[in-house]
Amino acid sequence: MNINDAVKEYQSLSRRIKYFEEAAAVMSWDLQTGAPEKAVIGRSGVIGTISTEAFKMLISEQMEKLLVFLSNPENMPHLSRIIQVSVKEDLKKFNRFKKISAEKYEAYIVLTTQAEAVWKEAKALGDFAIFKPYLEKIVEFLQEAAELWGYDGHKYNAMLDIYEPGVTTEQLDKIFGYLKEKIIDLMGRIKKSGYVPDNSMFLKSYDKDMQRRLSLKILDKMQFDLKRGRLDESAHPFTIKLNLGDVRLTTKYEVNNLTGALFATIHEGGHGLYEQNIREDLAGTPLCTGSSFGIHESQSRYWENFLGRSRPFWEMFYDDLLEIFPEQFNGVSVENIYHGANRVEPSLIRVQADELTYGLHIILRYELEKSLIGGDIKVCDLPRLWDESMQTYLGIIPGHPGEGVLQDIHWSKGYFGYFPSYTLGNIYAAQFFNQMKKEIPDYDGSVENGDFKGINEWLKEKIHQHGKLLKPAELLHRVTGEEINPKYFAEYLEKKYREIYKI
Amino acid sequence: MNINDAVKEYQSLSRRIKYFEEAAAVMSWDLQTGAPEKAVIGRSGVIGTISTEAFKMLISEQMEKLLVFLSNPENMPHLSRIIQVSVKEDLKKFNRFKKISAEKYEAYIVLTTQAEAVWKEAKALGDFAIFKPYLEKIVEFLQEAAELWGYDGHKYNAMLDIYEPGVTTEQLDKIFGYLKEKIIDLMGRIKKSGYVPDNSMFLKSYDKDMQRRLSLKILDKMQFDLKRGRLDESAHPFTIKLNLGDVRLTTKYEVNNLTGALFATIHEGGHGLYEQNIREDLAGTPLCTGSSFGIHESQSRYWENFLGRSRPFWEMFYDDLLEIFPEQFNGVSVENIYHGANRVEPSLIRVQADELTYGLHIILRYELEKSLIGGDIKVCDLPRLWDESMQTYLGIIPGHPGEGVLQDIHWSKGYFGYFPSYTLGNIYAAQFFNQMKKEIPDYDGSVENGDFKGINEWLKEKIHQHGKLLKPAELLHRVTGEEINPKYFAEYLEKKYREIYKI
């Protein structure tokens, strides 16, 4: 085989895989947004067939032959950087799937499909027992998989490697340990302050069409390009990149709570900007997405929290808010709104948690899933350990498993190793934010004026454009000159809440 | 090969083809409804790849082997009726494509893609000359194809066979000749009557959201199932069946004309009901669609014209109309509306033509394309012959080719043989309508009461459920006991306009 021919064949195969993935993604988006209720019966077979086709190409003999040839140390130096990193990325995926027998893998897909359905029922009933046997099998599969994939140190590192390549339990234990202490300390001082910001301005009645107008207004200010994307409504907000010219966001409008859709839109807008700003020569390669789950989350959380819950943001957005919801915000000052948007209150449900306590929800999950995969605890211990940690960290205990250990879908789908990326997102975001404020002249002033051009250019130049070409640690180091460092996030929280709560 | 195994393999291959076609169809619908402007750049490659895959399976060696085996006279009698008809249908498609070399076919796809773009420009400029060389090549290709496919009688019969299997020029010459005379005679008497119904109630200003409400109200009355379908807006109204649980319609709202969206919705609703009512055991086979283009059109035209432009319909719909557009219809009687919806006026553009003159637009096109394919006229003669026929049939002449010979997209896409199905649709619809009125007790009363249950049951039982299991002639004969007979359509027109115009 000649290198040029191999590269061409590899590019063509990669593009074909992307095409099939895009087709499946369009149908998946459609099912979650406006497809008729009965469409799914016929559509699921279509999505299954098209997705399987993409998967088969990824683990095909043709792909194996190409990857082996191109990754050969004699050939690698002759490849462009994009091809080099693409080959490494595909090789990793290839090995992950190929090391598990096809029968095992298929059985696992069936298992997780059933597990998700059972989880839904178990959550609704608040009954952990019916979900337990499924979760046990999932954990067992992942433990075996970790052995087949290989790992250094803790077995859970094999899971982390899927979502946050390069990050280990050794690092996370330190980072999360440090953060846990800081957050619990801050929570205690906030409680002692006795101040409870009024957030009733967000809990009135808000017409859905007007909420949509507000959401579109924010996206426009954020410079999310609606010629290359759209905003819809779905049961759970999400972002999906179909291609570089088509990045779709969803949000969810609740009539009696304005913050739900508002912050969901800003959050997904952050993910969306990342995907829209990836350099065009990565299109059709496996690198045309974010660097990692954590880096992706750093972008959504930067916009949602660091910017969206900041005082300058509300200074800027106040007039729009008053124009769209004059009655609801009549007589409410920017300061009131800013405080209302930053009310801290320990709560049971992760996705409803405030910016401060959110981290504890994640650390709790990280500790449990690490111990589960490591074999230190058993699935049957989960409900008890969950409630104990909730008591220790947040001082509250779920009334039933539906609002406790069963609240999240992740484990039913086998997504172990995923949760840490949410808090890593905050940590990365704080590091980027710290750097950005140093490098962008008059950062606060720009936000107050609704001028996000400088911010967007900075994010695109430093982070977005690279897609998956840079590993998370590499990217972080390039931008900030540092490794993961939770200090910036802790300082950010300390400064913000000290000022609001006067502590 | 054993018959059972062959049937299973054939069913599985057919289903797989349907899956790929459905994926491409979802993406095509998406591009035509709400996809972001820039999505198409990336998406066209995806749709192309997925469609080509379906096409390759249809003309694959595996398909050939199965079709040859199953269509063998020794095996055919052992197959179920559905498999028998499916095999015949696929064999027909297989032969149509296989008789043309792959290179020729690919060149033709390129040609029509370019031709469509050139046609768009030519239409905008009113310049036939730039489109002429493309159309010449298309006609040449189709003439050659007809020879390869084979035909009885006129060469154009090979084209008709694609859209309306079984119908020939020999039949159409007679049918259209008869109809042409009747329509021209009726038009003359209408003109002589001097009566011009006022249609200004439809030409005021109508809020688009309210028009959408009105459209959904009609679809609901028609019993179009919105749990298995949806209604969107697009540049040109269309119906697309994705699967039996997902049939999508589009319409187009114009602020200054209510009839556009109103009748487009009813029209597409008629197509949609047909697709929703096909028997479930045809899903995943090539028979899960309408019997022919003409029969499909008979359903849309029945609802749009025979029902939607009838007096009982407006009696029934009057209150809804007044509720949604009280100002616009204040003081307008049902009789006024009925007359306004049936105003006859010769016009240049086919898609804007009234129910009576529409047929002449089709007959004109039929005569020209038959002569073109037959070699009796040349592409360069078209503009002149078009204008001459317009003068003879409708008494008006286009100001430029953009509103004349270039107005329709069909020829640029190579759709010769398609136009006749529009008027065949009216002829079939009249025959079905005649039968329906005999078999449904108090037909007019049901419509006046908005009770379309009996009508829908009749249509489903007699027509819809069979899908493509019955050929058009077979279906028509089963339902009416007759062959194609334009008399019923002529009588229907005569009766309707005689009464309105008092002639």
Image (tube, coloured by chain):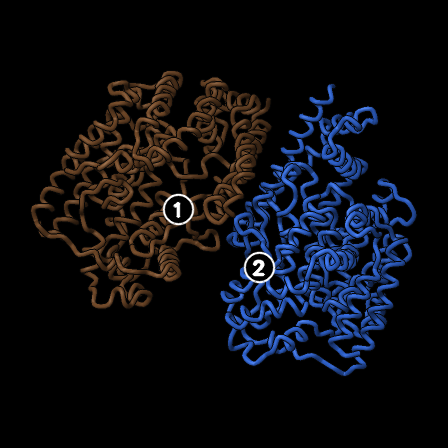
Chain colours: A brown, B blue
Left or right, residue B431 beside residue A100: right
In the rendered image, which residue does mark 2 sit on? B221
The answer to whether residue A458 is above or below residue B264 is: above
Front residue of B212/B447: it is B447
CA distance for labels 1 and 2: 29 Å
Left or right, residue B453 beside residue A459: right
Answer yes or no: is residue B179 visible: yes
Q: Position of residue A254 (x, y in %)?
A: 34, 54
Tag 1's secondary structure?
A: loop
Residue for point 65% across, 41% down:
B279
Tag 2's secondary structure?
A: helix
Outermost residue toward the bottom?
Answer: B194
Residue for point 67% across, 62% down:
B304
Q: Position of residue A326 (x, y in %)?
A: 29, 68
At label 2, the amino acid type is Lys
Q: Quarter-wise, where is residue B285 in the image?
A: top right
Front residue of A111/B466: it is B466
Q: Position of residue B355 (x, y in %)?
A: 73, 67
Left or right, residue A287 beside residue A207: right
The answer to whether residue A19 is above or below residue A368 is: below
Q: How many marks?
A: 2
At label 1, the amino acid type is Ala
Q: Position of residue A317 (x, y in %)?
A: 29, 61
Outermost residue toward the front?
Answer: B441
In the rendered image, which residue does mark 1 sit on? A235
Counting other residues with Cα less than 10 Å from the Cα at mark 1, is it few (<14), some (14-19), or many (20 or more)? few
Front residue of B349/B181: it is B181
Pointers 1 and 2 in contact (C-beta within 8 Å): no
